[in-house]
Amino acid sequence: MLSKLFKSKNKSWANKKKNPPTIAAAAIMLKLAQSDGERSQTEMTQLRKVLHGAFKLSDKEIETVIATTEKSQTSIRDLDSLTEEVRQNWGNARRIQLLECLWILAYADDRIDTKETELIERVAKLLCLTQAEQFRAQASAEKQFGLADFD
């Protein structure tokens, strides 16, 4: 499921590095992983899984993406420009999948921090997603963690 996100058609890593929406999405995910003031090993492990599954990146490439986004602290903080890059270049389905990945990262440490929720909601708003789309992304992530409410 995560492999659908950021799917590229036989692009090399060199091309992926130059793909601003992909880098912007990675930066948003890293920002979420650090939003509660902690950088837990569990969240970073989940972040690496998402980047590997979504981007088909090797471990070395993932570390490069993380290091690059960490070095550019100004752009990581600038959610407006990051989400604008994603919004302008990705269709609605990919933006919903990005939101789902954010929820997956948030659930990785078995607790949702208020700052994580606020960040995800802000990203959803900046990505121009409807409430229904936001709910669908969150419900899908919850289902993957066995948190879905089955009546």
Image (tube, rainbow, N blue to C red):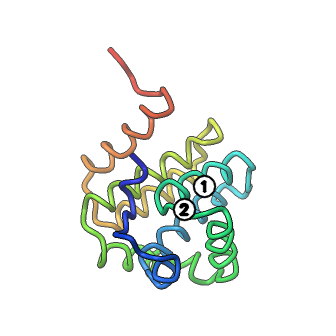
**Residue found 33% across the figure and 62% down from its top:** 95
Checking the image for residue 113, the label placed there is: none
State the residue position of label 1: 47
Q: How packed is label 2: few (under 14 Cα within 10 Å), some, or many (20 or more)?
A: many
The quadrant in which the N terminus is found is top left
Q: Position of residue 142 (x, y in %)?
A: 44, 35
Q: Amino acid at mark 1?
A: Leu
The amino acid pointed to by label 2 is Met
Residue 122 figure quarter: bottom left
Depth check, front residue: 3 or 76: 3
Q: Secondary structure at mark 2?
A: helix
**Left or right: 65 in relation to 39:** left
Q: Quadrant of the C terminus?
A: top left
Can you say whether 93 is above or below 70 in the image? Answer: above
**Which quadrant of the view contains residue 138?**
top left
What distance separates the C-alpha of mark 1 from that of mark 2?
Answer: 7 Å
Depth check, mark 1 against mark 2: the one in front is: 1
Q: Position of residue 60 (x, y in %)?
A: 68, 68
Q: Residue at x 37, y 63 (%)?
A: 7
Residue found 38% across the figure and 79% down from its top:
85
Q: Are marks 1 and 2 in contact (CB under 8 Å)?
A: yes
Characterize the local packing of mark 1: few (<14), some (14-19) or many (20 or more) Cα atoms within 10 angstroms: many
**Percent coordinates x, y for residue 149 in the rendering:** 39, 22
- Provide the secondary structure element on which disc 1 rests: helix
Q: Specify whether 8 is left or right of 62.
A: left
Q: Return the disc, 1 or 2, that comes first in the chain's sequence.
A: 2
Q: Position of residue 110 (x, y in %)?
A: 62, 35
Name the residue that disc number 2 marks. Answer: 29
Residue in the image at 68% along x and 75% along y: 70
Task: Look at the picture and state if 3 lies above or below 63.
Answer: above
Q: Is residue 37 above or below residue 91?
A: above
69 left or right, relative to 38: left
